[in-house]
Image (cartoon, grey):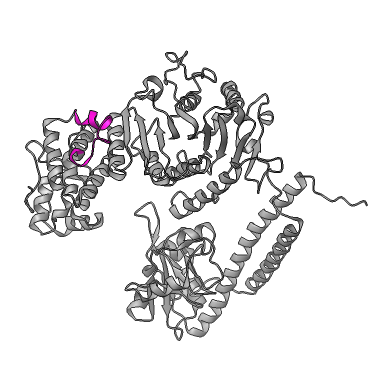
Amino acid sequence: MIVPGRRIALPGLDGPGINLAEIARIAKVSRAAVSNWRHRHADFPAPNGGTEANPEFRLVDIEAWLRDHKKLREDTLPARLWPLIENIGDRTLQAAVLATAAQPHIDDDHFHGALADAAKRVTPDGRGLAEQAQRITSKADTRETLDFLVGRWTEVNAPQSKVAAHLARLMAGVAAVVKTHASGQSLTVLDPVCGTGDLLMAAAQRFAADKLTLVGVEPDLGSAAIAGLRLALAHPGAPSDVRQGHSLRADPLPEAHADVVLSIPPWNERDWGHDELADDARWLLGSPSRAESELAWVQHVLARLQPRGVAVLLLPPAVASRRSGRRIRSALVRSGALRGIIALPAGIAPPYGVSLTFWVLQAPDPKAAAAGVFMVDASAIAPADGARSNPGEWTRIAAEIEATVRAAAGEPTSEQGPVAGRWVVQSALQLLDDQIDLSPTAHVPVADAVTIQQLDDISAEFARSVDGLGSAAAVLRRLGFVADGVPTAATTVGDLESARALTLRAGQAIQANEGTPPLDGAIPVLTVPALVRRGRADAWVDAESFARLLDSADPPVVAVDGDVILVGVETVQRSAWVHEGPPTILGPQLYVADHDKRLFDGWFLAGCLGAASNIRRASSRATTSTKIDVRRLQVLQLPLDEQRSYGSAFQAVDRLRHAVEAIAGGGEQLIQETTELLAAGRLNIYPA
């Protein structure tokens, strides 16, 4: 039993190097707090390695210092154990330690294959670490401790192989839409290149787990063992079998057949076994060329599907059109093995600038060929600026893609055709031309963008924007400026706060619904990403939730009509303005400047604070994101009457900005939609 307060260390493993981030995990504080300790406490341990920017310290020294300063807690033992495990060096041996540590908590339905193989490799020192992990893992925190250690292994050893959660959920969701599965039926899910098990984890969450079996193959033993361990911990009720091996060259599970296959096979792989597999029995649709490793994986997956089974593979777009793959693509269509192809929004997975594709496959069935192949073009669903950093936005995009696939994968009839430019079902005859180009963008026609009435509305709105531009410009033309003069005195927001002439209230993150606020009393939620994407709020909370938030211990910051709003980062064109409209909740990096209206005009204050030169002076580029220290922003010291004159001019400038933005956006849309209608032959030519 480990005695609280005693350090955990083994002979020979007493002093691994740990960095500031590891120290923060051990102490359960932020990295900034650790940096602060280094500067404030003269007795903080000196680094024993690393670099000036990322120093490393001996674990034993850090533990002693934390204990002496009463900052070492018993519940941080897993964080203190990980540096010792990491110090082993070999990633497979690290995984072996974790497998051995977890063995008492995992039943035989899970502890076999790669997990058992890895556990056999544990060294004497590693076994000692595993025993320590077992001792600090009680029944109450077994999952939490092991999840932490597994998470650290993945972060350190396999960050590039991690599948983003939104992508894994979408792949499982598409499979669930296409694969009809009655609740209670047995279901086997396979990933032939499973990495650390992200897709299998997503499948277990999406499909009923009462009779679910999860199967994976992975070339790297360490990753395979971690995948098996994750599945055993997260889904103990679903038997799993993860094996080490290369599925194409020497499949360790050649007899395994699955109802669902989810996989991201290697792309552009030259050394995939082309020569030794030239006569492989899996090449029923033709022997893949050396340059078509993806089509080798496609046929391997088809060979592992049960009758009526479905597979979803993530592939690069070139696979749908390369000349070297025409023969196999033709056979996929003729055999009925290709159910559909989905062009995805760029940014959904690396490489982020490319619109990748899902290939939806089914067990070959010549009768299925008559149903055709659905083509979905979802490449334009994501906003133009991408949404990779916004999980809520990816949830919305995934729901829209699933809905489109559900429509496209329905039983086709002669009346079905393209809907909203998103999808179409193509017959084999339509696809089997000389090129066999299966790219969705080559087959999904672009629907007429707008109706004639909508185009008239766009034209009218554009004309109003032009009129607004003229009005705003006319106001500015009447302004006169002094060529030279004595600089006007200014003061900072911080000084105004100290004098109680102004108070800053900082916004904070809250849980909100995605999308445009409805009209039934919902409260808009404005965030910096929303300002970047659309220039307005794109989230909301209902009235009941808003009332609860206001009654909480930490109520949100709400901007009301007439409030001055400031943006605390340099990511938007409009950094300060006077709020107009309904009450709006503000998110992080947004501020309300509550000001004494007897001392300040609102638009004067917003205009001063939002000036580009003022923003530059108050900006800090210490990190990759440029933050603004809003308390360093300056305000001119002018009498209220003069402020109002300035305020009117600042407001006119703001209206000019709105008019320019409206003309730019509206003009672009007017040009695009008019061009599309002309290109579609819709011009009504009247005789002269």
Residue 429 seen anywhere in this rendered image of the structure: yes
Question: Quadrant location of residue 194?
Answer: top left
Left/right placement of residue 500 relative to residue 169 reads left
**At x 63% / y 65%, what residue is drawn?**
659
Q: Is residue 335 left or right of residue 673?
A: left
**Magenta segment:** 103-120
Vertical comparison of 581 with 39: above or below: below
Q: Is residue 551 left or right of residue 650?
A: left
Could you tell me which residue is drawn at 65 percent across and 36 percent down?
442
Considering only vertical position in the picture, is 384 above or below 302? Answer: below
Q: In this view, does 459 lie to the left or right of 683?
A: left
Q: Does the magenta stretch include residue 519?
A: no
**Residue 105 falls inside the magenta stretch:** yes
Q: Position of residue 81 (x, y in %)?
A: 16, 44
Q: How many numbered marks, from 0 up? A: 0
x, y percentage for residue 177?
Answer: 52, 44
- Quarter of the rendering containing residue 626: bottom left
Any part of residue 491 in sight: no
Identified at 66% across, 35% down, the residue is 426
Q: Residue at x 41, y 22 (%)?
A: 248
As rendered, which of 159 and 167 lies closer to the eye? 167
